[in-house]
Structures are given as structure tokens and as C-alpha cells.
Amino acid sequence: MKAEFDTRQLRLLEADIRRQEPRKLQAFRRVVRNAAGAMVVLWKENARDSAGKHGKRYPRTIGYDTYDGGLSAVVGPDATMPQGGMSFEYGSRNQPPHLDGNRAADDVERVFPKWVADAAELDL
């Protein structure tokens, strides 16, 4: 006896998922980009307030790069630029920690899960 199944609906569903997956990934990439961008803006604002005249170049060094096809990001100062190290963030023998990035991360962390959930629920 040979079992036969009507798989037309299953094939249609598979085709639909394949069409949606790249768009869903784009939504998640947008969330990562927006979160990284928000963190950069907040970090720079915090740094302008805390760095003072001695760290006037520091805020301009803060940016982000995305990895894993845009699904992860690294945010922080560019060490190749003047005042681009982490001595403002974590302190040094010359100054206490400013924790500008940590405060920015705390702010973004409050909204990030909602952004991810919203992207997951998008009807694309």
C-alpha cells in the first residue's frame, strides 16, 4: 500500500515563508541599526556633558559597526581617532569613569525588547 498526501498547501506555505523570511530579516536588521544609532546619539550626548573641554574630541569618535549580516552591532569610540579610547568610559589614572556608554546602553536596553517583538510580529 502506498501512502499519498496532498502537499500543495504545504508547498504554498513553504513558498510564502521563503518570500517573507528575507523581509523579516530586514526588519530585524533595521531594529539593530536603529538601536545602535540611538545608542550612538545618547552616548555622544552623555559624552558632551561629561567630557568637558579636556575631552572635546571624544564624542566625535563614537560610532557603530554591524556584523553577522546586520544582526549584531558593536558601539563605541573608534580607537584610531584622537581621544577614541575607552579611558573616558572606564576611567584612567587621570580621571574617573564617565560611564557615558553604559548609561546610553541602559536607555536603549529599556526599549530594545519591544522593538524586537514589534519586528517579529510585523505582518509582511
Image: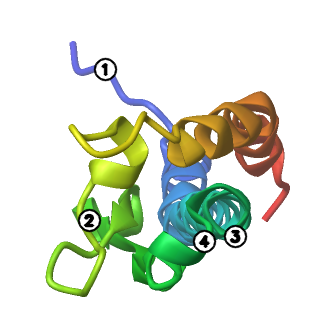
- State the residue position of label 2: 67
Label 3 crowd (10 A; few <14 / some 14-19 / many >=20) = some
Residue at horizontal 35 percent and vertical 68 percent from the top: 77
- In the picture of the structure, the residue carrying the numbered disc 1 is 3
Residue furthest toward the left? Answer: 80
Circle 3 residue: 41
Q: Nearer the viewer, mark 3 or mark 2?
A: 3
Q: Position of residue 57 (x, y in %)?
A: 45, 85
What amino acid type should be assigned to the residue bearing mark 2?
Answer: Tyr
Q: Amino acid at mark 3?
A: Val
Residue depicted at 63% across the width and 69% down the height: 44
Is 11 left or right of 93, judged from the image as shown? right
Quadrant location of the N terminus in the rendered image: top left
Q: Earlier in the sequence, mark 1 or mark 2?
A: 1
Residue 56, position as x, y percentages in the image: 53, 81
- In terms of sequence position, does the residue under pointer 2 or pointer 4 come before the other? 4
* Secondary structure beneath label 1: loop
Kindly indicate the quadrant of the structure image that contains residue 36.
bottom right
* Tag 4 residue: 23
- Tags 2 and 4 in contact by the CB under 8 Å rule? no
Instruction: Give the number of marks.
Output: 4
What separation in Å lies between label 2 and label 4 (alpha carbons)? 18 Å
Q: Nearer the viewer, residue 16 or 68?
A: 68
The residues bearing labels 3 and 2 have C-alpha atoms spaced at a distance of 20 Å
User: Can you say whether 83 is above or below 116 in the image?
Assistant: below
Mark 2, mark 4: which one is toward the viewer?
A: 2
Disc number for residue 83? none
Sort mark 1 into few (<14), some (14-19) or many (20+) by Cα contacts within 10 Å. Answer: few
For numbered disc 2, what is the local secondary structure?
strand
Disc 4 marks a residue whose amino acid type is: Arg
Q: Amino acid at mark 1?
A: Ala
Closer to the observer: label 3 or label 1? 3
